[in-house]
Amino acid sequence: MRVVLAIVFLALILKDTSYLGDHYILRGLSQGLCLGAGLWWLVMGPRGSVAPYAVLGIYGVVLVVTAVLSREPVYVALQVGSLGAVLLFFVAYHEMLRGSLTPNATILRLLLVAGTLVLVISVVGAWKWPDLAYLYDPMAGQLRFRGLFGQPGMMGSAAGLMWGVAVFGPWHWTIKGGVGALSLVCVALTSSRTFWVAWLLATLGTWWWTTRGRAMVTAGVGALLVVLVFGLAMVAFGLRVSEKTVAHTLRTDSIENLTGRTKVWKYALSSWWDRPLFGYGFTTGDEPFNTGDEPFNARKGTPLAGKGRDVKRYTLHNGYIQALLDSGAVGAALYVVVLGLAIIRIARPQATQLRVPLFILLFAAIANMGETIIFSAATFQSVLVWYCVVFGLSLAEQVPRAVERPVALVPEAAS
């Protein structure tokens, strides 16, 4: 199971960062392995209790209903099946490792190595190949850093998650500092305010909760010293930051409407009333934006797949509104309950060894307000969050097992 888990995430990371054009092959490999391993677990007879995942199962049933009621039932069914395969495998994985001291060791090591490599290449690319590493954003009116990813938002979410893996993981302080600093540089370069806010709040929240506030004093004093040193350096060397530079970095001209998001959300919420209970179908909540008379022209000039629609969907830049349009009030309510329950179960022991999954869920839950992070099984960031959701739900009956020894001190058993 550990080998399968490593292959699944490695394939998704390659899919999201490569320029090979074989995204569907890598995604198919990843989720095909998930389905095979999950079905094998079911056929062999599930070990452990599935009761902790009941609410996740109900959510899955609702998503199936959205496929039946959707105007694109085949497409939606494939998306539901893709996510279902991933969730089934994660349930099987955690149930088969019930009692293990290191259920997250494999994923932590993989993310540290692969994630660091991606960030290093991305930063080098910003210097050596800026045409590939930067993407012009017409909404922001400027070039934005994307590194090896397709969009700046994907880089922002990946770098933010890597910060949590590096800083809160069981590594040597040199790794924490080096990879943490690299991650922070990449988050900053994206000029993505959503991930700046998510990084800050998730970091403070994780530190405060898992140390019961002790780290807050240290963090506060450290931040104050950094500000003082920076301020003194500016005075000493006569440095000045122009208003133009500040406006360009913070994109202050787009703060009022959040780069057009408020208009999108307003139109999306008004469209929700047309299908309030079960929505337009999982991952097809963008349907109202493709009627031809909407004010946004979400996919202007793009043919519709199958019936002419392109398979690339238009996300609503808010995971909760996305869930509302995808699966209606019923699905969105379960979506929030599943996420909230996972966070509560991870946070309940206040164990420092659970800081990485807690950070990942807090970061994703906050960033989900400005970008659609917790979504289908199409990106490694989304799948990583769903992994942590299943892990959190699995703790309902095994809180003692959740307190892990440091990864470096416990060798993994052969898979």
Image (cartoon, grey):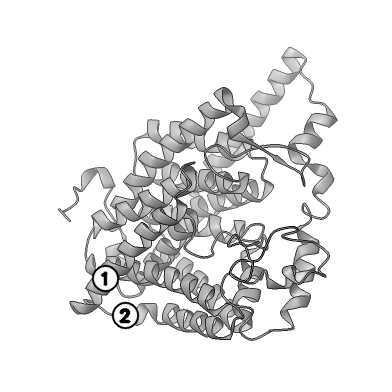
Q: Is residue 104 visible?
A: no
- The N terminus lies in quadrant: bottom left
Q: Quadrant of residue 265?
A: bottom right
Whole-percent x and y of residue 382? 49, 59
Residue visible at 73% across and 73% down? 288
The tag on residue 272 is none
Q: Secondary structure at mark 1?
A: helix
Q: Is residue 106 above or below residue 73?
A: above
- Residue 4: image location, x then y, percent: 27, 57
Residue 179 in picture, x, y percent from top left: 44, 35
Number of residues whose C-alpha sits closer than 10 Å to that of mark 1, classed few (under 14), some (14–19) or many (20 or more): many
The numbered mark at residue 50 is 2
Question: Which residue is depicted at the point 82% across and 26% down?
Answer: 242
Residue 64 in view, yes or no: yes
For the C terminus, give its image quadrant.
bottom left
Q: Which one is in front, 280 or 187?
A: 280
Farthest left residue in view: 414
Report the residue marked by disc 1.
Answer: 95
**Vertical arrangement, residue 147 with respect to residue 205, above or below:** above
Which image quadrant for residue 247? top right
Residue 49 appears left or right of 286: left
Instruction: Specify the amino acid type for callout 1.
Output: Glu
Q: Earlier in the sequence, mark 2 or mark 1?
A: 2
Q: Is residue 415 left or right of residue 387?
A: left
> In the rendered structure, are the residues bearing label 2 and label 1 in contact, judged by CB atoms less than 8 Å apart?
yes
Above or below, 138 against 371 in this view is above
Residue 233 occupies which quadrant of the picture?
top right
Judged left or right of residue 271, residue 360 is left
